[in-house]
Image (spheres, rainbow, N blue to C red):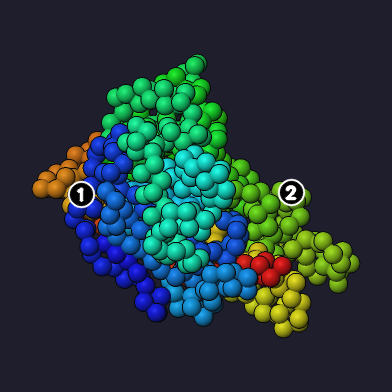
């Protein structure tokens, strides 16, 4: 398959060897024992706005898929970076802002590249640079990044070539050394094509040194630790199935938990030394056993991984190991309620929110807009609330948000509480309307710094509200059965109860799905709902389930209640929030 772009920047594809490529990419043979001649590789090159994968953006991707010394597909597209391209980068690459103005953004391009390269080994010249950009963008966009190993032609050249023969291993220098037919031009596809020829010449050099497989090649490279390869026996018995794996230490403690669509392939990758994370090499050297749990499909594996992380808190996992933790903006049960930040959810609350400061900011913004009291004194059985306003002798700055010229009775105060409750449940968004009006007033008064702070606080509040309402809509459903097509023309099935995965299975191609569904429902876990908008479900698990059931192709098979958002939910303000986030990012880049 060849993918390229036309002048308008749209990605187009041309089939060359699709059937053969797919068949070999799906081959179950362990890639580490497969000959280099039969190994599919994708040589990739990027052009970017700068050298930092954290702050700079991709402007062009070029890739060449090869196997057996032949090119079987190409991929090329300009990418709209969504930011200014520095003049020095324009001079170096020739890519101008006008060229990328109508190109797709990275969110549209990266999934296509992942599918183009799936099942292959990624190769790049200075792979750390290219892989860093690709992996960071995948993480930022929430895209699964299935490539856990890569080859670097810089590292390969340093191992194979002497300093006298190659004083420099820059791509242009190696292209001159090997007299390749395609010269690097600082354009992605040209540089990828040049790298392909350099790679082939380097592999020719090691062929007569007993290096015939990818595993032997990785062992040949100086950064590979033979002690890791010696521990491959730990993977004995691990199947090529979706699931979760657990590395255990000398005291049987869980060191690391991970998930994979192919357990055997993923576990074996840890013993090549190719993982860029140094902690992983240390973890493997300590490990004494590997356990695994087979799963029906990727969703079940993801959920089980989250639950195992929460149960074991492995030392080598950087992901959250406390999915039940978080902060909640709670409407208190006092006679004159107020908003406070708590670790414990109630029936009237918003969250969970990972950062306490963020939760306090949201509580302050909503409470101030609604006129709820911010004083912390207990109201007990008082018949009224009175914090004096400035006109009545109260403080000018830092007073209660419900300060007034006269005492407030319950009939005066309770409509404010109802407005906050309606905002949380999505029954009304009048408070958001008043907050946006406040932003307009600050801008009209040319108080731009205050307006920017208010905008950022409001966009964060909208995002948290929208997420809570989305997930709450899922969690309130007692039972939801969802099916999604798999890549074998069968069905992946999930039984979800109150925001938790209660059962998972697969209806293979040619098998009637409804009897499988009935069996799954009958055997599914019983879930007792808890308190709060998520009914006691952990945020990360519910969010994972929500993404899975709302992606294209998912079908609701059965539901005990309608799966719908309230009419005045914060999701209606998502476009406003995105615009606010873009404005904040533009301001940040401007310095």
Distance between the Cα atoms at labels 1 and 2? 70 Å
116 to the left or right of 194: left
Note whether residue 18 is visible: yes
Label 1 belongs to which residue? 23
Could you say which is closer to the camera, residue 575 or residue 125? 125
212 to the left or right of 344: left
Q: Please tell me which residue is depicted at 69% across the width and 52% down the height of the picture.
A: 357
41 to the left or right of 80: left
Q: Please tell me which residue is depicted at 39% across the width and 41% down the height of the picture.
A: 205
Q: Locate residue 347, reporting x and y percent.
A: 52, 50
User: Element at badge 2?
Assistant: loop
Could you say which is closer to the camera, residue 244 or residue 454? 244
Residue mark closest to the camera, 1 vs 2 = 1
Which residue ends up furthest to the bottom in the rendered image? Answer: 444
Could you say which is closer to the camera, residue 315 or residue 351? 315
User: Element at badge 1?
Assistant: helix
Which residue ends up furthest to the top in the rendered image? Answer: 251
């Amino acid at each position: 398959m060849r993918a390229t772009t036309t002048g308008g920047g749209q990605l187009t594809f041309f089939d060359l060897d699709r059937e053969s490529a797919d068949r070999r990419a799906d081959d179950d043979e362990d890639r580490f024992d497969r000959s280099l001649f039969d190994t599919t590789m994708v040589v990739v090159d990027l052009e970017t706005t700068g050298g930092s994968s954290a702050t700079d953006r991709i402007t062009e991707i070029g890739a060449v898929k090869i196997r057996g010394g032949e090119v079987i597909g190409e991929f090329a597209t300009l990418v709209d970076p969504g930011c200014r391209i520095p003049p020095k980068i324009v001079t170096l690459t020739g890519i101008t802002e006008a060229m990328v103005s109508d190109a797709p953004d990275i969110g549209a391009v990266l999934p296509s590249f992942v599918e183009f390269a799936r099942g292959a080994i990624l190769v790049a010249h200075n792979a750390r640079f290219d892989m860093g950009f690709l992996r960071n963008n995948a993480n930022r966009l929430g895209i699964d990044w299935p490539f856990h190993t890569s080859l670097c032609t810089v590292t390969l050249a340093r191992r194979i070539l002497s300093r006298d023969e190659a004083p420099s291993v820059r791509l242009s220098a190696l292209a001159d050394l090997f007299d390749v037919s395609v010269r690097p031009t600082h354009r992605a596809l040209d540089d990828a094509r040049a790298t392909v020829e350099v790679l082939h010449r380097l592999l020719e050099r090691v062929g007569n040194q007993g290096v015939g497989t990818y595993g032997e090649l990785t062992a040949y490279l100086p950064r590979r630790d033979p002690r890791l390869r010696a521990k491959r026996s730990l993977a004995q018995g691990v199947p090529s199935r979706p699931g979760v794996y657990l590395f255990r230490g000398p005291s049987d403690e869980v060191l690391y938990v991970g998930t994979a669509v192919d357990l055997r392939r993923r576990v074996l990758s840890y013993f090549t030394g190719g993982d860029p994370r140094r902690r992983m090499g240390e973890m493997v050297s300590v490990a004494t056993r590997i356990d695994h749990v087979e799963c029906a499909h990727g969703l079940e594996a993801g959920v089980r991984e989250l639950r195992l992380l929460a149960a074991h808190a492995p030392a080598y996992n950087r992901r959250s190991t406390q999915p039940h933790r978080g902060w909640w903006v709670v409407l208190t049960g006092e006679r004159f309620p107020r908003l406070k930040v708590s670790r414990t959810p109630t029936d009237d609350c918003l969250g969970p929110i990972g950062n306490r400061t963020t939760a306090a900011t949201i509580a302050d913004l909503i409470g101030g807009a609604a006129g709820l009291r911010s004083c912390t004194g207990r109201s007990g059985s008082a018949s009224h609330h009175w914090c004096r306003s400035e006109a009545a002798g109260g403080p000018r700055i830092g007073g209660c948000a419900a300060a007034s010229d006269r005492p407030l009775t319950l009939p005066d105060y309770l409509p404010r509480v109802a407005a906050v409750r309606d905002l949380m449940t999505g029954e009304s968004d009048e408070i958001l309307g008043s907050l946006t009006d406040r932003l307009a007033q600050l801008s009209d008064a040319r108080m731009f710094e205050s307006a920017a702070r208010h905008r950022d606080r409001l966009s964060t509040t909208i995002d948290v509200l929208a997420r809570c309402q989305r997930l709450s809509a899922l969690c309130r459903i007692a039972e939801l059965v969802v099916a999604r097509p798999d890549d074998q023309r069968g069905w992946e099935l999930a039984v979800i109860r109150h925001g938790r995965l209660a059962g998972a299975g697969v209806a293979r191609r040619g098998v009637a799905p409804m009897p499988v569904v009935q069996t799954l429902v009958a055997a599914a876990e019983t879930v007792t709902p808890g308190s709060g908008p998520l009914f006691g479900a952990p945020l990360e698990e519910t969010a994972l389930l929500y993404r899975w059931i709302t992606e294209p192709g998912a079908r609701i098979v059965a539901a005990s209640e309608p799966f719908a958002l309230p009419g005045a939910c914060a999701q209606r303000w998502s476009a406003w929030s995105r615009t606010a986030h873009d404005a904040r990012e533009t301001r940040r880049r401007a310095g």
